[in-house]
Amino acid sequence: MDKSLWLLMLACALGTFLLRALPLIWMRRHLDRLSISNNSGAMPIWLTVLAPTMIAAMFGVSLVPAHPGLSSWLATLSGGLCTILVWRRTRSLGWPVCGGVAVYGVVVVLLRILA
Amino acid sequence: MSSVETAKNSAWQQGTRDALPLLGGYIPVAISFGLIAVQSGFSAQETVLISTLIYAGASQFLFIAMVASGVPLWLVLVMTLLINARHLVYGPNIAPYLSNSRWWPLLMHGLTDQIFALAHTRLPQLAEKDRMGWYISAALIAWLSWILGTAVGAIAGAEITSRWPLLGEVMPFALPALFLVLLAPRFTSVQWTLTMLATIVAALVLKLMGMTNSAIPLAALCGVSLFYLMQAKLKAEGKAHG
């Protein structure tokens, strides 16, 4: 990486850290001022809606396979369904991802053998 | 060992136990990140440093892709921060459970989507004195697994792809699977379900149209707009009936 890329990376890292740390500092001061322990009324609604929609948008973008085609879409659908099923059973974060990736891989291999 | 020490250890152990399932999601995604970054022209050291310092999955992939495709640097910075803007809501949501220790803001480097989800559930259940130990333990496990996974992907990436070429094709699915798991608990009402589905479809269509860089913020704005439209409709109906 040249100097400008290093600076860019450091700026991204610092910016990301500040996005995580500054709202906490702000909210702690806000709570101190109000002397309350429940922040549900203090959070702007748009902020609580924007967080999950950003993750939903990232999910939508990441769904598109690197090489879109019938087999990759079928594998994506199967992997997604498996992820949901495992999540419903375990309510954990790691196992559904492992299961989804495994099924995605199996479908890719099976379709390759059948083709 | 005194009872105080036992309690402290137990909080740290609890944090480790809670964070272990994250490894299944973190390591495959981190390996695929390391692999993609090296394939995009970054060195192994640079790739590991990106994971250590930026430490935000989706935006790291975007960072690599945008730099590799020659996008202006200011746009890379804006897009990275825009994607990570969702983190703005995490700190305030867990603030009521945190002490006034000056270390907490520094520890927010480890506040990823998954750690937030864990912390939001676990912190209220823990005694105040145990919360920092639990958080450091869980966040450290997640951070180190991300760095280690990246290093494995970056260093052994070429060998992994040559020996098991299918892995490079299959492993990136860990990313949508991870987002799906994070989203699943959100499908709690018709309003949220429609908002989520509209956002996902919008992002997918925009990506397929080639609008890779703007798909995420535009789709998120679509979702927020739809949420507010439904909110207004529900209020109007409530007034009409009430």
Image: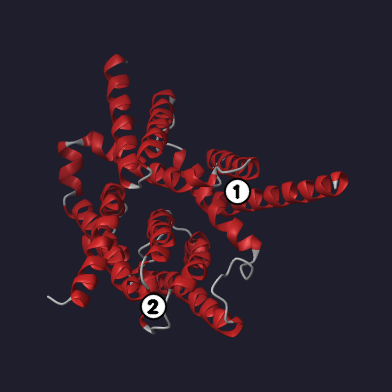
Q: Chain of mark 1?
A: B
Task: Give coordinates of residue B10: x percent, y percent.
Answer: 22, 66
Image-based side of A48 in relation to B122, left or right: right
Which residue is pictured at 64% across the width and 68% down the height? A41
Which residue is pictured at 44% across the width and 31% down the height? A68
Q: Which residue is mark 1?
A: B219
Considering every residue shown, the one lying at the far top of the view is A114
Q: Which mark is residue B104?
A: 2
Could you say whether the residue bearing mark 1 is in a helix, strand or loop? helix
Which residue is more in the foreground, B167 or A46?
Answer: A46
Could you say whether the residue bearing mark 2 is in a helix, strand or loop? helix
Which residue is more in the foreground, B112 or B169?
Answer: B112
Picture quadrant where residue A70 is located: top left
Q: How is the image coloured?
A: secondary structure
Measure how far apart labels 2 and 1 are at the Cα level.
32 Å
Which residue is more in the foreground, A59 or A95?
Answer: A95
Instruction: Inspect the image, locate mark 2, and give the three-letter code of the amino acid beneath it.
Output: Trp
Q: Chain of mark 2?
A: B
Image-based side of A95 in relation to B67, left or right: left
Q: Give the mark nearer the N terminus: 2 vs 1.
A: 2
Picture quadrant where residue B100 is located: bottom left
> How many C-alpha atoms fall within 10 Å of the one at disc 1: few (<14), some, or many (≥20)?
many
